[in-house]
Each structure stands twice: as C-alpha cells, then as structure tokens.
Image (cartoon, grey):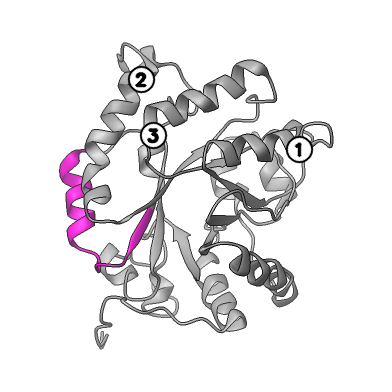
Amino acid sequence: MITLGLTTWSEHGSLVHEGRARKLTLPEYSQFLPCVELDTPFYGIPRLSSFEKWATETPATFQFIVKANQIMTQHRGPETVGALSVEEVFTHFKQNSAPLVAAGKLKTILFQFPPFFGVSIENSRYLRKVRSYLGDLPAAVEFRNQMWYQEEFRQQTLGLLRQLDFSHVIVDEPQTQTGSAPYFPVATNQLAILRLHGRNFAGWANQGKDWRGQRTLWRYNHSELASFVPDIQRLATETAEVCVIFNNNSGGDAADNALTLQKMLGVEFTGLAPQQLDLF
C-alpha cells in the first residue's frame, strides 16, 4: 500500500481551489489525502480534547503521523516545561493522544532527532528507553546526523531500528555539513516513511531570522518526483505500507507535488471524506 500526506493541513488551500489562500480545515483536507503529519505536539503537547476532535472529524480510515515533543527528542530538557522527568513527558503525550490510538488513527509517532544526536552508546541507550516508554505504540525515527549512516555504523543503526521496531524515516533534504542525513531508502519494519523536505540548500543552511520561511522553500520538478517512483514501488513490495510526506511547505508547493506524485504512482485512495461542491 502507498499513501501520501502533507505536513499540517491548514496551509494547503490549493487542494480546494487553485490559488486560494485561506486556511484549510482538517475535514476539507481529508477529502483529498488519507493521512497528515501533525507537527504542533513538537512545540507543546495538545490537549486531550484536541486529539478527540481530530479523531472524530476525520474519516474512519484517516491516520495521523504525530511528531514527538521536543523534550522526547532531547531538543530540550524536561525542566523547561516544569516536568520532573522525560518519562513524565512521555506519559503526558500518551495520555493526551490516546483518542487517536483508540480510533486506530495513529499511524506512528515521529521522532525527529536534532543534529547533535549522533552515534554514541548513550544515544543508543536512549533509543531503547524510548521504546520502553512507548510500549507497543508505533514510532518512527528520523536522524539529522550523518554519523548514523557512515559505513562503520550503518548496519548497526538499521539493526537497532529493526530490533526496536522503529520505522526508518527516509529523507530527501539538502546535504549540509551539519543538520542533514543522506537519502537512504531502506525500511526497517512494515511501515516505510519518506519525508521530502525539498532541496533548497541555501534555505536549509540559513541561520537568520527568516529561516522558517526559507528552509522548505522548494518545488520538486517532474524529473525529481519521478526519481522517487522506483524506490517507492520497491519498498511497497517489501513492506505493508509506504507513506510519503511532503514537507516543502514554505512556498505552498507540497499539495501540488503530492497530487502529481499520486498520478505518477497511479494510486487511488479510498475512504476519504466526501468532497463538497465549492461554488464560491
């Protein structure tokens, strides 16, 4: 099975009407794509009521990739939010996101680790702690440190992800000296995830005030999208699901790129919300 989704839903008004700038609602988004990546929990864990709302206003088969909170990925310490421990943050995250689990709508929890999270015994142990904290909840790991993919560590990295039943997040992103991981299309469990961040090298390396607006400013052209097709099709034969997430949001290109890739792959999605006639 091949699925496609975008990072967030509100920024993709072009799904409903070409050139429309207004924010999209989640029910509208679910008329077109079967999953979405939810990034807000990285900055602050949403309320239980929010997760309940998202679960009830989407179709039965719709799913969420939920980004782990920044304390869970060691971007910040638990003391910054008044928590006693990292485990306490994990507990809070699991309690609030439980409605998605109960509804069968949690595709996975995305752990996007920072560039300083490199290969070490300590960090390998932390990955094991993550699995212990999560229990049997699905999780995916995205590295942003190239050390994990160096030849001397690569097989151990993949072996650890397989042992812990973590999906390996395959990334397409600019290759800078720090803060990047190479494109390495290998799955480690039955869910393969591709996150496509674009190829804006200058924006990726930008440390200025406007870095958020520049980092994912990229529109994949036809040949760039076509280059992913063989790997996606191969991974689809090796896993139960390949999920492709477009994160090139800065210029509003993600939705168009996703729909174009869908046509290239020749896939159709069932169980979407019924589309409403848009007259105005």
Q: Which mark is residue 43?
A: 3
Question: Which type of secondary structure does the marked residue at label 1 adopt?
Answer: helix
Q: Name, please, the residue furthest toward the right.
A: 151
* Figure quadrant of residue 88: top left
Find residue 97 and report its horizontal and vertical position in percent: 26, 42
Q: Amino acid at mark 3?
A: Tyr
* Residue at the image position 46 percent from the left and 64 percent from the top: 5
Q: Amino acid at mark 2?
A: Glu
State the extent of the magenta-drawn residues as a range.
47-64
Find residue 32 and report its horizontal and vertical position in percent: 38, 75
Q: Which residue is mark 1?
A: 154
Q: Earlier in the sequence, mark 1 or mark 3?
A: 3
Find residue 103 and report its horizontal and vertical position in percent: 22, 55
Contact, mark 1 vs mark 2 (Cβ under 8 Å): no
Residue count near mark 2 (Cα–Cα under 10 Å), binned few <14, some 14–19, many ≥20: some
Q: Nearer the viewer, residue 209 or 63?
A: 63
- Residue 150, relative to residue 183: is it above or below? above
Contact, mark 3 vs mark 2 (Cβ under 8 Å): no
**Real-space Cα separation, disc 1 to disc 2, in angstroms:** 28 Å
Q: Which residue is mark 2?
A: 87
